[in-house]
Amino acid sequence: MKISITVITILITAITSQAQFSDKKAIGTSHFSKEQNVNAFDLDGDEDMDILLPNRWYKNLGSGRFEKHTIGDQSEKQASAFAADLDGDNDLDVILCHSYRVVWCENDGKGGFSTEKVMIEIEWDWFWSVYAQDLDGDGDMDVLATAENDQKIFWFENNGSGTFSTRKMIFQRKSYDDYPLVRAGDLDGDGDVDVLSATLWGGELRWYENLGNDGFSEPYLIHNSATHTTSIHMIDIDGDSALDILTACKDDSIVWYKNNGSGIFSPPMLITTSADHPNSVYATDLDGDGDIDVLSASKFDDKVAWYENKGNELFSEQKIINNNAKEASAVYATDIDGDQDIDVISISDGANVFWYENDTTEIGAIILTPQNRLSVYPNPVKDVLTVAFVDRREVREQIAIFNMQGQQMKFDVEAAKNTTKIYVSHLPSGIYKLSVLHDNLVTTKLITILK
């Protein structure tokens, strides 16, 4: 019997512990000092999270060990890197932007990358930021990029096998140079992917509505802070299934903008001014209580810190992870050690990349299930994910899937005696969190959907 799952909420109550983090642990170095771009993806298909930086990646060997590999031309600085399955072969390729060109490198499925394949090359455009999403809704990953010259924001349509259109302009402002940051997600709740941008110097936060037929609206201004915007992030902060916006600015403010669900945003809502020149922000559930917390890396006070979501749109005072992270420039979070909680990654001390293990062991009245109570396969998955139970007397479990923006996904399930099949072919490629409540115990697992 196939059942359509629209809303399943797993309640975690009576929180009795806080997220605690270890001292910093070395991963390696970035190619350049004060790098502001760090991400984590399963680049070699071995079901753990590797670290991606411009010019290089670090293979996760387990037990806190990493191995350096290079990507792309090592003679030039790359401003940004991102990963997505661009050629439809179920592994994650890497997109890079140099000063004068945007390129991608094909993954052989095991973390071996090809030489650069040029998408665009224009001298003096100064490409700055890259991202990937399915912008035209045809099931493959398109590429977003920005350039300093004229504040250009543009995209390349994926033709389905890793070949791309010429660039399609979303926005440019003639004779006015700046460094646009770019992200993408469904901001107005109409089921397609819109574009978000912020300018480093001008401080303008804008979004562009996806109009269909490869077109985007003129920019909607969310806020003009008149201060330098250093970092942006899209995530559902307040749990209402709408993508909110998180930003950091050089005036020491970290703020968020509440989305009413249709792309109308609140004035900035202050989280903190305790980070001195925050260079980077990120958000995820750090303490396992089911809501979205905030991370920051700040340059002038040498801090990596987090801010607990207290509910009712309020956050705690700053909680220090490391107060000796010299000129901290980037922060990210994912499950590095496979223990089903979220660890923290940062860049500081020049070009050094570190991680901080999350030592939280209890998430409330419900304790994490031993992983041998059930198995989840295949992972990565393309169409159908199977949850197999060791001892299921009746079908009473609750299952939820969340994307990395904290939004709960809709899906169909089909239950049999000891298995439940979850149909995920409609979900975009990416990393998701699967939560299964069974016999009053919760199992969480990161899954990768690849098209």
Image (cartoon, rainbow, N blue to C red):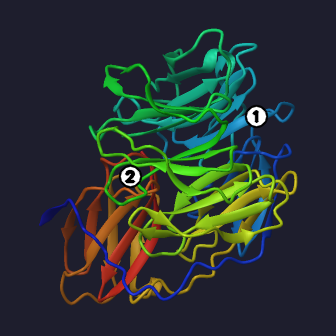
Tell me the element at label 1: strand
Between circles 2 and 1, the one closer to the viewer is: 1
Is 421 placed above or below 265 here?
below
In-front residue for pair 32/203: 203
Q: Amino acid at mark 1?
A: Gln
The N terminus sits in image quarter: bottom left
| Position of residue 326 in the picture relative to residue 358 (left or right) | right
| Position of residue 433 in the picture relative to residue 275 (left or right) | left
Instruction: Tell me the number on the disc at residue 164.
Output: none
Is 409 placed above or below 344 here?
above
How far across and how far down the image is residue 167, in percent?
53, 17
Residue 345 visible to the viewer: yes
| Position of residue 201 in the picture relative to residue 348 (left or right) | left
| Residue that label 1 marks | 78
> What crowding class fits label 1: few (fewer than 14 Cα within 10 Å), some (14-19), or many (20 or more)?
many
How far across and how far down the image is residue 364, in percent?
43, 86
In-front residue for pair 8/15: 15
| Residue that label 2 marks | 382
Tell me the element at label 2: loop
In-front residue for pair 328/393: 328
Give the residue displayed 56% in from the left and 63% down from the top. 47
Chain-order first, disc 2 or disc 1: 1
The C terminus sits in image quarter: top left
Q: Amino acid at mark 2?
A: Lys
Give the residue displayed 73% in from the left and 45% down from the top. 36
The quarter of the displayed image where residue 212 is located: top left
Q: Are marks 2 and 1 in contact (CB under 8 Å)?
A: no
> What crowding class fits label 2: few (fewer than 14 Cα within 10 Å), some (14-19), or many (20 or more)?
some
The quarter of the displayed image where residue 213 is located: top left
In-front residue for pair 212/303: 303
Give the residue displayed 61% in from the left and 20% down from the top. 151
